[in-house]
Image (spheres, rainbow, N blue to C red):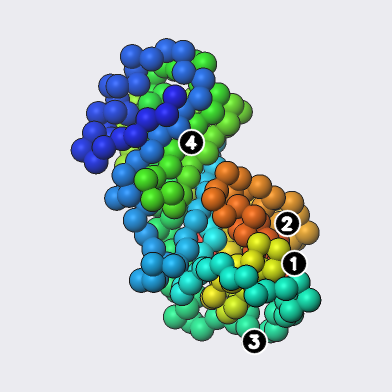
C-alpha cells in the first residue's frame, strides 16, 4: 500500500486510518517535507543530502550522504583523469565538522520521529499482523526509514501504546568521511565538499570500534532505487576506500 499523508493528518492517519486495513503486507508512507524532509546541506539548489535509517526496537543504522556546495553531472570526466585524494583534501575545520554533526543530528531526529509514527500504527499487537515491509519517506525524497520482517517483529515485541514524540537512541558510534572535490568517472558526476556518515550503535567491545573493512560491503545498495543510485554508490565506495574516517562517540540521548 502506498499512501501520501497531508500536513495536518499525520497523527490521525497513524492512529485511525490504517486500523481499518488488516491485510497489508507492504506499506510505503510519504510524508510532507516539513516532517523531516526539509533539511538542506546548503542554500544551493544543486546541493545534495540523502539519508536512510533502519530500525528494529531501536536504531540499527543510519547512512547520510551529503555535500555543502554542489552535486552535478558533467561529460568531461574520464577514468584516467580521476585524481587521487590527498590528505589535505580530506581535512575538516572545526566549524565544518560542527555543520556536518548538525546534519546528522537533524536526520536522526527525523528518523526517530518516523519510527514513533510506525509504533503508533502497530501499537496494538493485533494490528497489521501480515505487515512485512515498511518504508517511511518524504515528498522531497531526502530521507527514508526502512524496516523488514525481522525488524518489525522485534518492534512488535516491545511496543506499547504510549505516544512518544521520538525514539531514544543508544550510545552511538559515528564514522565520517569527507573530501573537498570528489570526481566520479563511472557515473560522470562531481561532488564538491562531499560527506559520508555512518551511524550505528556503539559496540559492546571497544576494540571493535576502529574496524572498517566491512564498511564498503555494508554500504552496498543502501540507496537502491534512488534516481542517482549509480553516482551515490560510486561516491561511497571511493570515499571508504581512499579516506580515513573521523570517529565520533555519542552518548545515549
Task: Locate residue 88, reporting x and y percent.
Answer: 64, 87
**The image quarter in which residue 28 lies:** top left
Task: Determine the CA span between mark 1 and mark 4.
Answer: 29 Å
Q: Secondary structure at mark 1?
A: helix
Crowd rating for badge 2 (residues with CA inside 10 Å; few <14, some 14–19, many 20+): some
Reading the chain from its start, which is encountered first: label 2 or label 4? 4
Please give the residue where the numbered disc 2 appears in the rendered image: 216
Foreground residue among 231 and 147? 231
Q: Secondary structure at mark 2?
A: helix
Reading the chain from its start, which is encountered first: label 1 or label 4? 4
Circles 1 and 3: CB atoms closer than 8 Å: no
Horizontally, residue 191 falls left or right of residue 238, namely left
Please give the residue where the numbered disc 4 appears in the rendered image: 135
Task: Determine the CA span between mark 2 and mark 1.
Answer: 8 Å
Please give the residue where the numbered disc 3 appears in the rendered image: 88
Q: Residue at x 51, y 68 (%)?
A: 71
Circles 4 and 3: CB atoms closer than 8 Å: no
Task: Determine the CA span between mark 2 and mark 4.
Answer: 23 Å
Q: Residue at x 49, y 56 (%)?
A: 50
Circles 1 and 4: CB atoms closer than 8 Å: no
Q: Residue at x 44, y 80 (%)?
A: 95
Q: Quadrant of the N terminus?
A: top left
Crowd rating for badge 1 (residues with CA inside 10 Å; few <14, some 14–19, many 20+): few
Circles 2 and 1: CB atoms closer than 8 Å: yes
Q: Is residue 216 above or below residue 149?
A: below
Q: Is residue 219 above or below residue 98?
A: above
Task: Locate residue 223, reporting x and y percent.
Answer: 59, 49
Q: Secondary structure at mark 3?
A: helix
Reading the chain from its start, which is encountered first: label 1 or label 3? 3
Task: Locate residue 175, reporting x and y percent.
Answer: 61, 64
Amino acid at each position: 500500500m502506498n499512501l501520501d499523508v497531508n500536513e495536518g493528518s499525520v497523527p490521525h492517519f497513524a492512529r485511525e486510518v490504517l486500523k481499518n486495513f488488516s491485510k497489508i503486507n507492504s506499506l510505503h508512507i510519504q510524508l510532507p517535507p516539513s516532517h523531516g524532509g526539509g533539511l538542506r546541506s546548503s542554500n544551493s539548489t544543486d546541493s545534495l543530502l540523502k539519508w536512510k535509517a533502519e530500525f528494529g526496537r531501536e536504531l540499527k543504522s543510519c547512512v547520510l550522504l551529503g555535500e555543502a556546495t554542489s552535486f552535478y553531472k558533467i561529460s568531461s570526466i574520464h577514468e584516467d583523469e580521476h585524481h587521487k585524494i590527498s590528505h589535505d583534501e580530506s581535512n575538516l575545520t572545526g566549524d565544518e565538522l560542527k555543520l556536518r554533526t548538525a546534519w546528522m543530528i537533524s536526520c536522526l531526529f527525523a528518523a526517530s520521529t518516523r519510527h514513533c509514527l510506525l509504533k503508533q500504527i502497530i501499537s496494538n499487537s493485533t494490528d497489521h499482523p501480515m505487515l512485512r515491509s515498511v518504508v517511511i519517506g518524504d515528498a522531497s525524497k531526502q530521507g527514508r526509514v526502512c524496516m523488514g520482517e525481522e525488524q518489525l517483529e522485534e518492534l512488535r515485541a516491545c511496543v506499547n501504546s504510549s505516544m512518544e514524540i521520538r525514539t531514544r537512541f543508544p550510545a552511538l558510534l559515528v564514522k565520517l568521511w569527507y573530501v573537498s572535490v570528489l570526481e566520479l568517472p563511472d557515473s560522470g558526476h562531481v561532488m564538491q565538499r562531499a560527506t559520508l556518515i555512518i551511524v550505528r550503535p556503539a559496540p559492546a567491545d571497544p576494540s571493535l570500534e576502529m574496524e572498517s573493512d566491512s564498511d564498503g560491503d555494508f554500504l552496498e545498495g543502501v540507496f537502491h532505487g534512488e534516481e542517482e543510485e549509480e553516482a551515490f554508490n560510486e561516491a561511497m565506495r571511493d570515499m571508504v576506500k581512499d579516506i580515513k574516517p573521523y570517529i565520533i562517540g555519542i552518548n545515549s540521548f
